[in-house]
């Protein structure tokens, strides 16, 4: 696999920049013309999808990459932790860059496609099939037709159709975000005639587990982007695979071993706390982590929303820049995860389940780990994980109180849980770790480049135009940040980023019609006079 890397590297450089393959390999070993040539040094802060994505490409380009693997210790867990260490992660059909990556590094971390369901206190509301196995219908008819709704009448389902007009109008441009971001998802759905039951039983819970906040607190722009990406663009986009263990164990560790073998240095437990910049060049020259100062030619900050806020508050360099101060207006949402081992085997019909309307204001998911994790495949009893999002009400509870709530909720979904006892538990809290895309948040979000010429940003809360979300978006923004470094340092070739799948022909026609209509509207007198 490593040799494959080198072949690809030589090929892309030859093609794109006319480098000589042999000269480059000599140069990367510092032996060119008998002189020791130093490689350009890049520092990556954070080792989630965004940080590792950037590191991967930059190592391939021959840069000297160091990764700081710190993290904010909230005091609520024994040690700082990120979702990839404990959270259970789903990988949806459109995560094309991640699927291509795992093929490239030669690992097989995923289950096959899994079926999922949605529960309320009244029991199962919706069961989702594997959409790619169903007859393919023009979007969104497949999702509406093949999904099995236990109680929701057809008339309610059809009230989703007018929302297509907003979805085609929202083209993920800056103008579209500014147009839709100020209103809430609930208001948008109300304007487009969504029925009360469709909203309550399907859309609100779906948004809660994808945008990690209730629909009345979510930006309509983020809602349209998420609904389009996961539900409306293509029938099969709703299909999901799960990681067969933690992402850390199944993907990041083998990936990091590969990076180490290429010379990348990982500094564990080293949180970046401040930055020095040179008045002369305007560039970041050093990153402070604890008592160390690390020099770098370029820096990528790839940390989550609460971490960047902590860094900005402590950093005199970042505090002096408007784009970093604005980030302090962003909001992180809490998550709590409970992994439970029970004394008996309970039959869970679907491996992956979303739940809502259980008394607390948060939506939650539960996963059958016997069906997903290799390590629990042959367990004689049930092992499951429940994750709570927007979990403000759960965070202060003791582990025992959380377990008791989880078990009472689970019993309302599946009768078998009533007789089960918890024999082991692992509770993790992620305060402010998920980005809350609240109405009006767009204007506070950062872009990949900053006012420091050599400081770049990556993560699932960064503005980009790719159209992906969550882990795939983080990975893509990592590659985009790596490309900015390549551009800034003038060395190496650009990472190839796979775009989201093209729209279906009928959607393309609707999008073009919507663009023309907007064009005509913008030319009408008074077009910018009224509040949009
Ligand atoms: C409970 C839960 C369930 C989720 N489920 C899914 C799912 O099923 N599917 C999906 O696609 N997404 C899911 N997500 C979202 C997904 O986890 C994130 O989109 C993704 O992890 C973001 O990756 P990232 O690299 O941008 O940030 P992170 O994963 O947060 O990585 C940032 C890294 O930076 C480190 N760091 C922080 N501060 C510093 C510092 N000062 N110095 C050095 N390092 C630092 C952190 O320790 C961390 O390792 C879930 C999230 C949670 C919390």
Image (tube, rainbow, N blue to C red):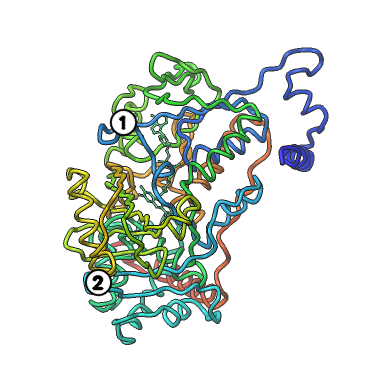
Residue at 57%, 64% (x, y): give it.
Answer: 501
Tell me which label, 1 or 2, sits earlier in the chain: 1
Q: Return the x and y of residue 490 as percentages of the image width and height.
A: 65, 31
Q: In which quarter of the image is residue 289?
A: top left
Residue at 53%, 45% (x, y): give it.
Answer: 250
Residue at 25%, 56% (x, y): give it.
Answer: 421
Q: Is residue 211 left or right of residue 129?
A: left
Q: Secondary structure beneath disc 1?
A: loop
> What quarter of the picture does the C terminus occupy?
bottom left
Q: Give the residue at mark 1.
A: 73
Q: Return the x and y of residue 365 as percentages of the image width and height.
A: 33, 59
Question: Which of 69/415 is in front?
Answer: 415
Q: Quadrant of residue 14?
A: top right
Which image quadrant shows ligand 1? top left
Residue at 63%, 44% (x, y): give it.
Answer: 495
Q: Give the residue at mark 2.
A: 200
Q: CB of residue at label 2: within 8 Å of ligand 1? A: no
Give above or below for 509 relative to 268. Answer: below
């Amino acid at each position: 696999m490593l040799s494959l890397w080198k072949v690809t590297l030589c090929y892309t450089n030859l093609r794109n920049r006319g480098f000589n393959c042999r000269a480059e390999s000599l140069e990367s070993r510092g032996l060119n013309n008998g002189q020791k040539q130093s490689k350009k040094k890049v520092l990556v802060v954070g080792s989630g999808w965004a940080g590792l994505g950037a590191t991967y490409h930059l190592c391939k380009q021959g840069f000297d990459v160091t990764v700081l693997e710190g993290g904010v210790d909230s005091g609520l867990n024994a040690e700082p932790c990120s979702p990839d260490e404990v959270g259970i992660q789903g990988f949806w059909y459109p995560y094309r860059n991640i699927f291509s990556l795992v093929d490239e590094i030669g690992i097989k971390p995923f289950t096959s496609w899994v079926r999922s369901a949605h529960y309320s206190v009244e029991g199962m509301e919706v069961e989702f099939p594997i959409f790619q196995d169903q007859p393919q219908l023009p979007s969104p008819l497949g999702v509406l037709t093949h999904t099995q709704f236990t109680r929701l009448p057809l008339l309610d389902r059809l009230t989703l159709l007018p929302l297509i007009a907003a979805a085609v109008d929202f083209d993920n441009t800056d103008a579209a975000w500014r147009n839709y971001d100020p209103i809430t998802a609930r208001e948008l759905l109300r304007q487009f005639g969504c029925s009360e039951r469709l909203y309550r039983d399907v859309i609100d819970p779906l948004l809660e587990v994808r945008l990690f906040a209730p629909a009345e607190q979510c930006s309509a722009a983020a809602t349209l982007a998420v609904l389009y990406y996961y539900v409306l663009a293509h029938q099969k986009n709703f299909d999901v695979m799960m990681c067969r263990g933690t992402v850390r164990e199944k993907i990041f560790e083998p990936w990091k071993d590969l990076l180490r073998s290429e010379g990348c240095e990982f500094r564990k437990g080293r949180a970046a706390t401040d930055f020095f910049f040179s008045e002369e060049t305007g560039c970041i020259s050093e990153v402070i982590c604890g008592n160390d100062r690390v020099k770098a030619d370029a820096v990528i900050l790839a940390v989550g929303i609460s971490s960047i806020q902590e860094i900005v508050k402590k950093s005199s360099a970042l505090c002096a820049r408007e784009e970093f101060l604005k980030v302090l207006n962003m909001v992180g949402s809490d998550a709590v995860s409970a992994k439970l081992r029970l004394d008996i085997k309970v039959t869970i019909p679907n491996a992956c389940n979303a739940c809502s309307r259980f008394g607390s204001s948060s939506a939650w998911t539960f996963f059958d780990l016997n069906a997903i994790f290799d390590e629990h495949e042959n367990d004689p009893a049930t092992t499951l994980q429940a994750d709570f999002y927007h979990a403000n009400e759960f965070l202060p509870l003791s582990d025992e109180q959380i377990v008791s709530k989880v078990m009472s909720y689970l019993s309302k979904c599946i009768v078998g849980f009533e007789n089960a006892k918890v024999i082991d538990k692992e509770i993790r809290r992620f305060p402010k770790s998920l980005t809350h895309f609240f109405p009006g948040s767009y204007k506070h979000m950062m872009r990949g480049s900053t006012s420091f010429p050599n400081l770049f940003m990556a993560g699932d809360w960064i503005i980009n135009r790719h159209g992906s979300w969550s882990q795939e978006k983080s990975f893509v923004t990592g590659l985009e940040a790596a490309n900015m470094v390549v551009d800034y340092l003038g060395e190496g070739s650009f990472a190839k980023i796979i775009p989201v799948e093209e729209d279906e022909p009928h959607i393309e026609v609707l999008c073009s019609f919507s663009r023309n209509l907007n064009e005509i509207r913008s030319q009408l007198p008074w077009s910018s006079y009224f509040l949009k």
